[in-house]
């Protein structure tokens, strides 16, 4: 649905915000971009809908290369791409209904049709009853719901989200994330979101990319990244002291394996001793995934290691 290739953005100030970014977002998935402040996340998002002109590279959304479009064509293409923001970006002098209606007015949708669509959208995001309120009368979570309703007004296939939950408390954040997940499932909406919060990736993302200094360090389906040796995402999801002590093994239990009695099997079958040095278990979209650091001692540690790998676990050895 979104294909970004060799994207570079150099600002007039000389800052290289994007330094050759490639990214593929599949139709119907929620894709999270993670990275520290200044990594280039917002620049990337603004380049995806051409709010920001890339210096070079291409951006294709739903099969259309946006970088070659003229202004009028680009405005039309942008209607298929909604966007929500950290600070909501609502018009304070307009009611909730009028905020949501705004993009429809710009697109010259007739008044009656506009009304019906606004009512439908407010119900979709759980804001029926708030149509006549003003933004200042709403909580942060309600404001973001208005932002989401407005972003979906023109029935986009893609929603871009720039830190949409960063200004919200944890409970409200969870309810907005649940709403995004529901919209994704019900409307088949493709969502590209950026965040600096790992828990956002954990709770709703199918795929993720990690950015640093204008580059993508790694990207792919979350569960595929976890199965990949040396994954930075895995390290950030399951923080363990780095570097691992010499002679230790770091074992990643992929989806569904974390509940299996693998360690007791290991001890029984191979007579090895297992010391647990650290570990953590996380729910990724409701599926348990774990990472454990152990030290193994005994006669047949080689066979024990082969057994772990044979069970589909990723075992990374820290050679002494
Ligand atoms: N309009 C601009 N003009 C010049 N430089 C900019 C502009 N916008 C961003 N930058 C610079 O580009 C780099 C990337 O900024 P960007 O806003 O994309 O990062 P970010 O990952 O979104 O950070 P944050 O997490 O703080 O929002 C930074 O060095 C920033 O100072
Ligand atoms: Mg940003």
Image (cartoon, grey):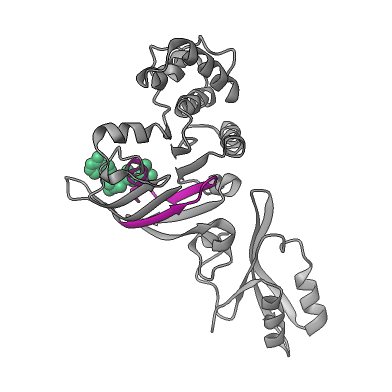
Stretch in magenta: 20-46
User: Is 118 a magenta residue?
Assistant: no
Quarter location, residue 172: top right
Q: With respect to residue 13, does 263 lie above or below?
A: below
Left/right of residue 258 with respect to residue 27 in the rendered view = right
Q: Measuring 41% from the left and 12% from the top, which residue is drawn there?
A: 94
Residue 299, given in percent of the width and then of the height, sits at 73, 90
Residue 316, given in percent of the width and then of the height, sits at 58, 75
Count the marks: how many?
Answer: 0
Residue at the extreme bottom of the image, as rendered: 299
Q: Is residue 213 visible?
A: no
Quarter location, residue 28: top right
Quadrant containing the C terminus is bottom right
Q: Is residue 59 visible?
A: yes
Front residue of this view, candidates 294 and 139: 139
Front residue of this view, candidates 153 and 252: 153
Residue 118, given in percent of the width and then of the height, sits at 51, 17
Ligand 1 sits in quadrant: top left
User: Is 30 a magenta residue?
Assistant: yes
Residue 53, given in percent of the width and then of the height, sits at 25, 43
Q: With respect to residue 293, does 128 lie above or below?
A: above
Q: With respect to residue 66, does 138 lie above or below?
A: above
Front residue of this view, candidates 253 and 78: 78
Q: Measuring 50% from the left and 25% from the top, which residue is drawn there?
A: 149
Left/right of residue 57 with respect to residue 121 in the rendered view = left
């Amino acid at each position: 649905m979104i294909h970004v290739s060799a994207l570079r953005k150099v600002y007039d100030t000389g800052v290289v915000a994007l330094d050759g970014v490639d990214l593929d977002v599949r139709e119907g998935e929620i894709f999270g971009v993670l990275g520290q402040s200044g990594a280039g996340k917002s620049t990337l998002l603004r380049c995806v809908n051409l709010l920001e002109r890339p210096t070079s590279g291409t951006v294709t959304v739903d099969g259309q290369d946006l970088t070659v479009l003229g202004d009028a064509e680009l405005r039309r293409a942008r209607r298929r791409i909604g966007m929500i923001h950290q600070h909501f970006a609502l018009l304070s002098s307009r009611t909730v209904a009028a905020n949501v209606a705004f993009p429809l007015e710009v697109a010259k949708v007739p008044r009656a049709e506009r009304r019906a669509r606004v009512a439908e959208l407010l119900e979709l995001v759980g804001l029926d009853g708030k149509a006549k309120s003003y933004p200042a009368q709403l909580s942060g979570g309600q404001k973001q719901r208005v932002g989401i309703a407005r972003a979906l007004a023109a029935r986009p296939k893609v929603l871009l989200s720039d830190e949409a939950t960063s200004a919200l408390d944890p409970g409200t954040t969870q309810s907005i994330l649940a709403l995004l997940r529901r919209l994704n499932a019900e409307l088949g909406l493709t969502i590209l979101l950026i965040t600096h919060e790992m828990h956002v990736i954990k709770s709703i993302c199918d795929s993720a990319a990690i950015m640093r200094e204008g580059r993508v360090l790694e990207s792919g389906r979350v569960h595929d990244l976890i199965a990949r040796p040396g994954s930075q995402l895995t390290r950030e999801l399951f923080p363990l002291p780095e570097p691992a002590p010499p002679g230790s093994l770091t074992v990643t239990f992929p989806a569904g394996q974390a509940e299996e009695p693998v360690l007791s099997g290991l001890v029984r079958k191979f007579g090895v001793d297992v010391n647990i040095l650290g570990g953590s278990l996380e729910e990724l979209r409701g599926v348990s995934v774990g990472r454990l650091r152990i030290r193994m001692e005994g006669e047949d540690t080689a066979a024990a290691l082969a057994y772990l790998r044979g069970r589909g676990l990723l075992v990374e050895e820290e050679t002494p």
